[in-house]
Protein backbone atom coordinates (compact mmCIF):
# COMPACT_ATOMS: atom_id res chain seq x y z
CA UNK A 1 0.00 0.00 0.00
CA UNK A 2 1.31 3.39 -0.86
CA UNK A 3 2.04 5.83 1.98
CA UNK A 4 -0.81 8.16 2.89
CA UNK A 5 1.15 11.17 1.71
CA UNK A 6 1.56 9.63 -1.76
CA UNK A 7 -2.13 8.89 -1.95
CA UNK A 8 -2.92 12.47 -0.93
CA UNK A 9 -0.50 13.84 -3.50
CA UNK A 10 -2.09 11.67 -6.15
CA UNK A 11 -5.55 12.96 -5.30
CA UNK A 12 -4.35 16.55 -5.53
CA UNK A 13 -2.57 15.84 -8.82
CA UNK A 14 -5.69 14.23 -10.24
CA UNK A 15 -7.79 17.14 -9.03
CA UNK A 16 -5.41 19.62 -10.62
CA UNK A 17 -5.44 17.71 -13.89
CA UNK A 18 -9.24 17.59 -13.89
CA UNK A 19 -9.40 21.32 -13.16
CA UNK A 20 -6.92 22.03 -15.97
CA UNK A 21 -8.89 19.82 -18.35
CA UNK A 22 -12.21 21.46 -17.48
CA UNK A 23 -10.66 24.91 -17.81
CA UNK A 24 -9.23 24.03 -21.21
CA UNK A 25 -12.57 22.59 -22.31
CA UNK A 26 -14.43 25.70 -21.19
CA UNK A 27 -11.92 28.05 -22.75
CA UNK A 28 -11.52 26.28 -26.06
CA UNK A 29 -8.41 26.49 -28.20
CA UNK A 30 -7.88 30.23 -27.88
CA UNK A 31 -8.51 30.59 -24.17
CA UNK A 32 -11.66 32.52 -23.34
CA UNK A 33 -14.59 31.71 -21.08
CA UNK A 34 -18.04 33.25 -21.28
CA UNK A 35 -17.60 35.08 -17.98
CA UNK A 36 -14.76 37.09 -19.52
CA UNK A 37 -17.13 38.24 -22.25
CA UNK A 38 -19.78 39.23 -19.70
CA UNK A 39 -17.15 41.05 -17.63
CA UNK A 40 -16.14 43.02 -20.72
CA UNK A 41 -19.76 43.88 -21.50
CA UNK A 42 -20.19 45.14 -17.94
CA UNK A 43 -17.04 47.25 -18.18
CA UNK A 44 -18.27 48.76 -21.46
CA UNK A 45 -20.95 50.61 -19.54
CA UNK A 46 -18.35 52.27 -17.35
CA UNK A 47 -15.91 53.51 -20.00
CA UNK A 48 -16.25 57.24 -20.56
CA UNK A 49 -13.68 57.62 -23.37
CA UNK A 50 -12.61 55.72 -26.47
CA UNK A 51 -9.00 55.15 -25.34
CA UNK A 52 -9.77 53.02 -22.25
CA UNK A 53 -12.42 51.10 -24.21
CA UNK A 54 -9.90 50.31 -26.96
CA UNK A 55 -7.29 49.14 -24.44
CA UNK A 56 -9.83 46.95 -22.64
CA UNK A 57 -11.05 45.33 -25.86
CA UNK A 58 -7.51 44.71 -27.14
CA UNK A 59 -6.51 43.08 -23.86
CA UNK A 60 -9.64 40.90 -23.79
CA UNK A 61 -9.45 39.60 -27.37
CA UNK A 62 -5.84 38.51 -26.90
CA UNK A 63 -7.39 35.37 -25.42
CA UNK A 64 -8.84 34.64 -28.85
CA UNK A 65 -5.55 35.19 -30.66
CA UNK A 66 -6.01 38.78 -31.88
CA UNK A 67 -3.41 41.49 -31.37
CA UNK A 68 -4.94 44.38 -33.34
CA UNK A 69 -8.33 45.82 -34.26
CA UNK A 70 -10.05 48.78 -35.88
CA UNK A 71 -13.61 50.07 -35.61
CA UNK A 72 -14.62 52.35 -38.43
CA UNK A 73 -17.39 53.43 -40.70
CA UNK A 74 -17.11 51.71 -44.07
CA UNK A 75 -16.12 54.32 -46.70
CA UNK A 76 -18.26 54.47 -49.83
CA UNK A 77 -17.96 56.30 -53.15
CA UNK A 78 -14.86 58.33 -52.47
CA UNK A 79 -15.31 58.81 -48.73
CA UNK A 80 -12.06 59.10 -46.78
CA UNK A 81 -11.40 56.49 -44.11
CA UNK A 82 -9.56 58.58 -41.53
CA UNK A 83 -12.53 60.71 -40.32
CA UNK A 84 -14.65 57.57 -39.97
CA UNK A 85 -12.34 55.68 -37.60
CA UNK A 86 -13.68 55.36 -34.06
CA UNK A 87 -11.24 52.89 -32.47
CA UNK A 88 -7.77 52.56 -33.96
CA UNK A 89 -5.82 49.60 -32.62
CA UNK A 90 -3.79 48.92 -35.77
CA UNK A 91 0.00 48.60 -35.60
CA UNK A 92 2.03 51.81 -35.67
CA UNK A 93 2.63 52.85 -39.26
CA UNK A 94 0.05 50.60 -40.87
CA UNK A 95 -2.85 53.00 -40.42
CA UNK A 96 -0.82 55.83 -41.94
CA UNK A 97 0.16 53.72 -44.96
CA UNK A 98 -3.37 52.37 -45.41
CA UNK A 99 -4.87 55.86 -45.39
CA UNK A 100 -2.17 57.51 -47.49
CA UNK A 101 -2.38 54.84 -50.19
CA UNK A 102 -6.21 54.86 -50.05
CA UNK A 103 -6.22 51.10 -49.59
CA UNK A 104 -9.85 51.13 -48.41
CA UNK A 105 -10.98 51.56 -52.02
CA UNK A 106 -9.37 48.27 -53.12
CA UNK A 107 -9.09 46.19 -49.94
CA UNK A 108 -11.36 43.17 -50.32
CA UNK A 109 -12.10 43.03 -46.59
CA UNK A 110 -13.18 46.67 -46.53
CA UNK A 111 -15.25 46.36 -49.70
CA UNK A 112 -17.05 43.23 -48.50
CA UNK A 113 -17.76 44.88 -45.12
CA UNK A 114 -20.08 47.27 -46.96
CA UNK A 115 -21.98 44.43 -48.63
CA UNK A 116 -22.88 42.15 -45.72
CA UNK A 117 -24.02 42.24 -42.11
CA UNK A 118 -22.81 38.70 -41.52
CA UNK A 119 -19.55 38.32 -39.54
CA UNK A 120 -16.83 36.76 -41.67
CA UNK A 121 -13.25 35.53 -41.69
CA UNK A 122 -11.03 37.60 -43.94
CA UNK A 123 -10.11 34.41 -45.75
CA UNK A 124 -13.78 33.95 -46.72
CA UNK A 125 -14.13 37.23 -48.62
CA UNK A 126 -15.51 36.30 -52.09
CA UNK A 127 -12.85 36.01 -54.78
CA UNK A 128 -14.31 38.85 -56.88
CA UNK A 129 -13.06 41.26 -54.19
CA UNK A 130 -10.29 39.33 -52.46
CA UNK A 131 -8.40 38.01 -55.50
CA UNK A 132 -7.75 41.27 -57.32
CA UNK A 133 -4.15 42.38 -57.70
CA UNK A 134 -4.79 45.46 -55.56
CA UNK A 135 -6.46 43.54 -52.75
CA UNK A 136 -3.68 40.96 -52.65
CA UNK A 137 -1.15 43.80 -52.57
CA UNK A 138 -2.88 45.30 -49.52
CA UNK A 139 -2.87 41.93 -47.79
CA UNK A 140 0.82 41.49 -48.58
CA UNK A 141 1.71 44.90 -47.18
CA UNK A 142 -0.25 44.17 -44.00
CA UNK A 143 1.99 41.19 -43.22
CA UNK A 144 4.90 43.64 -42.93
CA UNK A 145 3.13 45.00 -39.85
CA UNK A 146 2.23 41.66 -38.29
CA UNK A 147 -1.25 41.31 -39.78
CA UNK A 148 -1.95 38.09 -41.67
CA UNK A 149 -5.53 37.03 -40.90
CA UNK A 150 -8.63 38.29 -39.21
CA UNK A 151 -12.32 38.28 -38.43
CA UNK A 152 -14.71 41.13 -39.27
CA UNK A 153 -18.00 42.08 -37.63
CA UNK A 154 -20.06 44.48 -39.81
CA UNK A 155 -22.68 46.53 -37.96
CA UNK A 156 -25.40 49.05 -38.67
CA UNK A 157 -24.44 52.52 -37.54
CA UNK A 158 -26.19 55.75 -36.70
CA UNK A 159 -23.19 57.81 -37.79
CA UNK A 160 -22.19 55.95 -40.96
CA UNK A 161 -23.79 53.99 -43.76
CA UNK A 162 -22.34 50.91 -42.09
CA UNK A 163 -19.53 50.19 -39.63
CA UNK A 164 -17.17 47.27 -39.14
CA UNK A 165 -15.06 46.11 -36.24
CA UNK A 166 -12.20 44.14 -37.75
CA UNK A 167 -9.95 41.98 -35.57
CA UNK A 168 -6.46 41.14 -36.83
CA UNK A 169 -3.96 38.40 -36.02
CA UNK A 170 -0.35 37.64 -36.94
CA UNK A 171 -1.31 33.99 -37.46
CA UNK A 172 -1.41 32.84 -41.09
CA UNK A 173 -4.91 31.46 -40.62
CA UNK A 174 -7.64 32.46 -38.20
CA UNK A 175 -9.55 29.65 -36.49
CA UNK A 176 -12.49 30.19 -34.15
CA UNK A 177 -15.10 27.74 -32.94
CA UNK A 178 -18.76 28.74 -33.38
CA UNK A 179 -18.89 29.59 -29.66
CA UNK A 180 -15.79 31.77 -29.92
CA UNK A 181 -17.28 33.57 -32.91
CA UNK A 182 -20.33 34.38 -30.81
CA UNK A 183 -18.07 35.66 -28.04
CA UNK A 184 -16.21 37.91 -30.44
CA UNK A 185 -19.38 39.22 -32.09
CA UNK A 186 -20.90 39.96 -28.68
CA UNK A 187 -17.90 42.02 -27.64
CA UNK A 188 -17.78 43.81 -30.99
CA UNK A 189 -21.45 44.78 -30.82
CA UNK A 190 -21.17 46.09 -27.27
CA UNK A 191 -17.99 48.00 -28.12
CA UNK A 192 -19.80 49.56 -31.09
CA UNK A 193 -22.78 50.47 -28.93
CA UNK A 194 -20.49 52.04 -26.33
CA UNK A 195 -18.69 54.15 -28.93
CA UNK A 196 -22.03 55.27 -30.32
CA UNK A 197 -23.20 56.22 -26.83
CA UNK A 198 -20.02 58.23 -26.28
CA UNK A 199 -20.58 59.98 -29.63
CA UNK A 200 -24.20 60.70 -28.74
CA UNK A 201 -22.99 62.52 -25.63
CA UNK A 202 -21.44 65.00 -28.08
CA UNK A 203 -24.24 66.38 -30.24
CA UNK A 204 -21.79 67.40 -32.95
CA UNK A 205 -21.73 71.03 -31.88
CA UNK A 206 -18.86 72.71 -33.68
CA UNK A 207 -18.58 70.13 -36.47
CA UNK A 208 -20.63 72.33 -38.80
CA UNK A 209 -21.29 76.05 -38.70
CA UNK A 210 -24.89 77.28 -38.72
CA UNK A 211 -24.45 78.39 -42.32
CA UNK A 212 -23.08 74.98 -43.37
CA UNK A 213 -26.10 73.34 -41.78
CA UNK A 214 -28.41 75.66 -43.68
CA UNK A 215 -26.69 74.90 -46.97
CA UNK A 216 -26.94 71.16 -46.37
CA UNK A 217 -30.55 71.47 -45.29
CA UNK A 218 -31.51 73.16 -48.55
CA UNK A 219 -29.43 70.63 -50.49
CA UNK A 220 -31.43 67.89 -48.74
CA UNK A 221 -34.58 69.63 -49.98
CA UNK A 222 -33.30 69.29 -53.53
CA UNK A 223 -32.21 72.87 -54.05
CA UNK A 224 -29.28 73.69 -56.33
CA UNK A 225 -26.44 75.98 -55.28
CA UNK A 226 -28.02 78.75 -57.33
CA UNK A 227 -31.44 78.31 -55.71
CA UNK A 228 -29.89 78.11 -52.23
CA UNK A 229 -27.97 81.33 -52.86
CA UNK A 230 -31.24 83.16 -53.64
CA UNK A 231 -32.98 81.69 -50.57
CA UNK A 232 -30.17 82.63 -48.19
CA UNK A 233 -29.20 85.89 -49.85
CA UNK A 234 -25.66 84.69 -50.59
CA UNK A 235 -23.59 84.46 -53.74
CA UNK A 236 -23.53 81.07 -55.41
CA UNK A 237 -19.77 80.98 -54.88
CA UNK A 238 -20.28 81.39 -51.12
CA UNK A 239 -22.84 78.57 -51.06
CA UNK A 240 -20.41 76.29 -52.86
CA UNK A 241 -17.68 77.24 -50.40
CA UNK A 242 -19.89 76.26 -47.45
CA UNK A 243 -20.72 72.98 -49.20
CA UNK A 244 -17.02 72.27 -49.63
CA UNK A 245 -16.34 72.96 -45.96
CA UNK A 246 -19.17 70.61 -44.96
CA UNK A 247 -17.80 67.85 -47.19
CA UNK A 248 -14.35 68.30 -45.66
CA UNK A 249 -15.80 68.09 -42.15
CA UNK A 250 -17.23 64.65 -42.92
CA UNK A 251 -14.41 63.48 -45.18
CA UNK A 252 -16.76 62.81 -48.10
CA UNK A 253 -16.58 63.54 -51.81
CA UNK A 254 -20.03 64.90 -52.61
CA UNK A 255 -22.60 67.22 -51.06
CA UNK A 256 -25.14 64.39 -51.16
CA UNK A 257 -22.86 62.28 -48.97
CA UNK A 258 -22.43 65.23 -46.62
CA UNK A 259 -26.21 65.50 -46.35
CA UNK A 260 -26.47 61.80 -45.51
CA UNK A 261 -23.81 62.12 -42.81
CA UNK A 262 -25.44 65.22 -41.34
CA UNK A 263 -28.79 63.45 -41.16
CA UNK A 264 -27.26 60.33 -39.62
CA UNK A 265 -25.50 62.41 -36.99
CA UNK A 266 -28.73 64.29 -36.37
CA UNK A 267 -27.16 67.61 -37.22
CA UNK A 268 -29.95 68.47 -39.67
CA UNK A 269 -33.55 67.32 -39.82
CA UNK A 270 -34.92 67.57 -43.39
Image (spheres, rainbow, N blue to C red):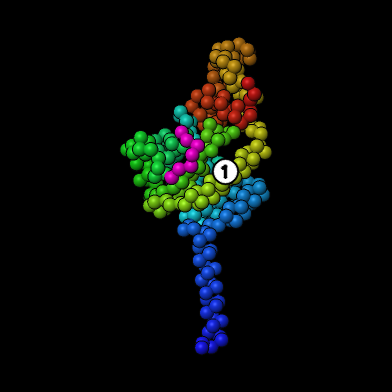
81 up-or-down from 89: above or below: above
Instruction: Where is residue 163? Give x, y as percent.
Output: 52, 37
Q: Residue at x 59, y 22 (%)?
A: 216
Q: Residue at x 53, y 22 (%)?
A: 256
Helix or strand or loop: what does disc 1 sit on? Answer: helix
Q: Nearer the viewer, residue 2 or 238?
A: 2
Does residue 114 appear anywhere in the picture?
yes
Residue pointed to by mark 1:
189
Quadrant location of the C terminus in the rendered image: top right
Does residue 146 appear anywhere in the picture?
no
Instruction: Where is residue 128? Give x, y as percent.
Output: 35, 35
Q: Nearer the viewer, residue 113 or 116?
A: 116
Instruction: Where is residue 38? Give x, y as percent.
Output: 61, 52
Q: Residue at x 67, y 38 (%)?
A: 201
171 up-or-down from 202: above or below: below
In-image side of 200 versus 185 (left or right): right
Near mark 1 (Cα within 10 A), the count class, few <14, some 14-19 or many ≥20, is some
In-image side of 108 versus 258 (left or right): left
Q: Magenta part of the protein: which range? A: 115-121
209 up-or-down from 167: above or below: above
- Dominant SS type (magenta): loop
Is residue 116 highlighted in magenta? yes
Instruction: Where is residue 240? Give x, y as percent.
Output: 54, 19
Residue reaching furthest to the left: 133
Is residue 41 highlighted in magenta? no
Amino acid sequence: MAPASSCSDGIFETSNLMYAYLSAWRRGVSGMIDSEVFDFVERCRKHTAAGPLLGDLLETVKNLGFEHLILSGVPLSGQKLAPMVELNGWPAGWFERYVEAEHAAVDGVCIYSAKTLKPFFWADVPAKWADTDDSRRVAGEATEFGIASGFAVPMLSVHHWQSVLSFASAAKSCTLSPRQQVQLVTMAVYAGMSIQALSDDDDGEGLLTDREREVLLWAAAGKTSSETSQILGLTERTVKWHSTRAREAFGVATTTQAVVEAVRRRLIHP
